[in-house]
Image: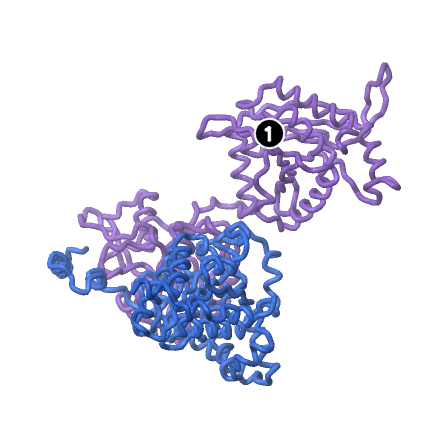
Amino acid sequence: MAKALHTHPQAREGDDNSIGSLVDAHGLLTPEAERDAAVSDDQLRELYRMMVICRRLDQEGLNLQRQGELGLWGPYVGHEAAQVGAALAMESTDWIFPYYRDFAMAVCRGIDPGNILTIFRGLTHGAWNPYEYRFAPFIIPVGTQVPHAVGFAVGCKFDHEQTAVLVGFGEGATSTGDWHEAMNFAGVFQAPVVFLCENNQWAISVPVEEQIAGRIVDRAAGYGFPGVRVDGTDVLTVYAVVRAAAQHARQGHGPVLVESVAYRLQAHTTSDDPTRYRTDADLDPWKGSDKDPIERCAERLRQRNAYDDTFAVAVAQEAEERASAMRQTLVAARPPHPESVFDLVFANPPASLMRERDEFTSSLEQGGAE
Amino acid sequence: MPMSQFLLPDLGEGLEEAQVVQWLVDVGDIVQLNQPICQVETAKALVDIPSPFAGTVRVLHAQPGDMVLVGAPLITIEQPRTSPAPATSDEEHPPVLVGYGAGGPPQTFSRRRRGVDHGGASAVTVTPPPEATAVPGVERESKASPLVRKIAQERGIDLAAIRGTGPGGRIRVEDLESVAGPVAVAAPQPTTTAEDEERISTVGLRKAIAAKMMKSATTIPHFVEYSLFDATNLSALRDRLRGEGGPFAGQRLTFLPFFVRALVAAVQVHPIMNSRWDEEGNAIVVKRSISVGIATDTERGLVVPVIHNAHAMSFGEIAAEIERLVPLARAGKLDVRSMTGGSITITNVGAAGPVDTGAPLINAPEACVVGFGAIKLRPTVVGEQVLARPGAWISIACDHRIVDGATAAQFMGALVSGLENPDSLIQ
């Protein structure tokens, strides 16, 4: 069995350059690739819509943290094209393993944003059933989700499922041992994984040039699979490339590394003060409409005559409503019952733990918890 | 109309307080949900706070400059009746995460906490003011948040003597007021200001300067030495450099880059001047690189931009770096790196007025600060004659833990010699 897994003559003969050739030297979809991708106007409008909604939710998350409703918020403004483009490129039967900043991916998967926020309020460790949405829990330790995703993908392969696994991480994670082990394992076992590096150029205060010698995308070659570097502010490119990469993985050709290059426009989290390590001038090149994922998508829609004010206003209005609904869901959320601490670790709890739970329950009833 | 009080949340992770920098709204203003209401500075960052309610501003609970504890009231807003129906009890309405520490104790599993008052009969409704009564001699266990306990302790209030008006008899900040008069939850209540006085809050830079100077004056044993130098050659050299055909033709070219170069050259002969006293290690730490701070007067106060690695720079590079840094400092646009990492500092005491010299305070934790007075014509003995020649006073203040007077005198000698024979400075 193991030997069979190690040898994939048909996979190794796969056209490893086909994904890389989708983009030009600037990381943008070539005209031929754009034609072949045949992304419809409606699909592009959906990408636009989700990016606008998710940006508004991000702003509301920041507001809620500053109003004391959340303990922490990790803004993702600037990541909209990467997260929305990649999440919508995956089939509903595929899996996504996010990192902590991939809020927009979770929203694209249909998880209630107000419920997601309960994590950042400290009410729960995971606000959804991963199997229901095929969306793994947010991972806070840097990079540990990457081996999870690869292991899961190898499992899918064992089960002969036509499933691709997308795993999101920042460029800082590429310096961790977990990431390298996962990349190696994925290459060796031809795991059906799309590695999505959301390179926002800052690992908290460490700039990418102090993080990595060379290019992240080139590391894929060292592990024996293709890598492609895309402009992470162009949602159409991200969408088309990740969709092709997922198809490549599903067809048994093995993993792909997609490096999406954009910029972290906000603080790392609300516990961070970026003015201590970067200046406003550093942000200037990334603030123009030519680098704004939403503006760029609007421009592509205009070129297709698929964008007008009615559409834009309706989307903005929906974004406001979603933000308001998210706030309401969050502030109505209740702290978990203390007994729930016993619930989510064991499928079949040992007797000793059940006894502890009973003692705890009776002490609560007697007011002992006071 | 329901009054809603917004308590300062923990804006980072584990913060205990924040300083109000400025209010963006006034009492009587109508604010929208999420409209920025004020800027506060925490130990971590400067943060804009968006309003958690729509309504009319009724009370600003702190002045700019006040420190506000996490969990203490920041603003009270009267919400219109058309607002979403307020919860009727704390139990029904979830608490706000005002902080991991000061915000409220997880003492009960119902997690009653002081939080945003969403109006109605909630536990922290502020109107009408609930009655709180001191009940002397009644012994019982007091329920109160750590914040309330802290305030009570500071004011010498016995919590056992207070009947709380919060849920389950919990003692609230307001209950302390009735016992001890108005409670300053913020920084110590300012003393009264007479009519002929103006009270200036110390926020931001002024506060930082105050702290630094206090440390310098009270923890570093200073001594100061003075010397006059003859600037005839230096003035001539400067005129030559900025004259027609010179490398700085048409430029302003101040004396400052010459001072920096002379200082670097003198430090290279006496590296001990480029050091600091390590309090914890009880050692002298001598820096190999020479990074020169330039004390700069700005509208906001004293700022010290740093010329990093000045020892590795040519005269022209130093001059250009000064021309770059000083305007940025005046505009308040220096990044952090440009304000930190200095190893010795220059202060141009003659720049702002007719000042010959002064006794500067060391820019802690450095070992030495050098003050240059105004260059002007002075009676100078040349041979047996008294001539009018340009000159200026130099003052150097040293940390006497590190440097003794004789060393400082030798350093002064090197400095004066460099400035009186300045050709080597521009090589």
Q: The residue under label 1 is which amino acid type?
A: Asn
Residue nearest the observer in this picture, A239 or B266? A239
Chain letter of disc 1?
A: B
Residue that badge 1 annotates: B274
Residue nearest the observer in this picture, A31 or B342? A31
Residue positioned 72% across, 41% down in the render: B317
Q: Name the residue at the top extreme.
A: B384
In the rendered image, the vertical position of residue B96 relative to residue A40, given as above or below = above
Looking at the image, what colour scheme do you see? by chain
> What x and y, as percent, mark residue B276?
54, 30
Quadrant including the C terminus of chain B: top right
Q: Is residue B381 left or right of residue A270?
A: right
Residue positioned 19% across, 61% down in the render: A342
Q: Secondary structure at mark 1?
A: loop
The picture quadrant where one finds residue A25 is bottom right
Do we see residue B119 in this rendering? no
> What x and y, as percent, mark residue B5?
39, 62
Quadrant including the N terminus of chain B: bottom left
Q: Name the residue at the right extreme.
A: B244
In the rendered image, the vertical position of residue A19 relative to residue A42, given as above or below = above
> What x and y, as percent, mark residue B351?
72, 37
Residue nearest the observer in this picture, B205 or B335? B335
**Chain A representation colour:** blue
**Chain B representation colour:** purple
Do we see residue B310 in this rendering? yes
> What x and y, as percent, mark residue A125?
30, 62
Instruction: Estimate how packed mark 1 is, as few (under 14), some (14 to 19) or many (20 or more) residues with alpha carbons within 10 Å.
Output: many
In the rendered image, the vertical position of residue B245 relative to residue A114, given as above or below = above
Q: Is residue A100 left or right of residue B397?
A: left
Residue nearest the observer in this picture, B410 or B70? B410
Q: How many marks?
A: 1
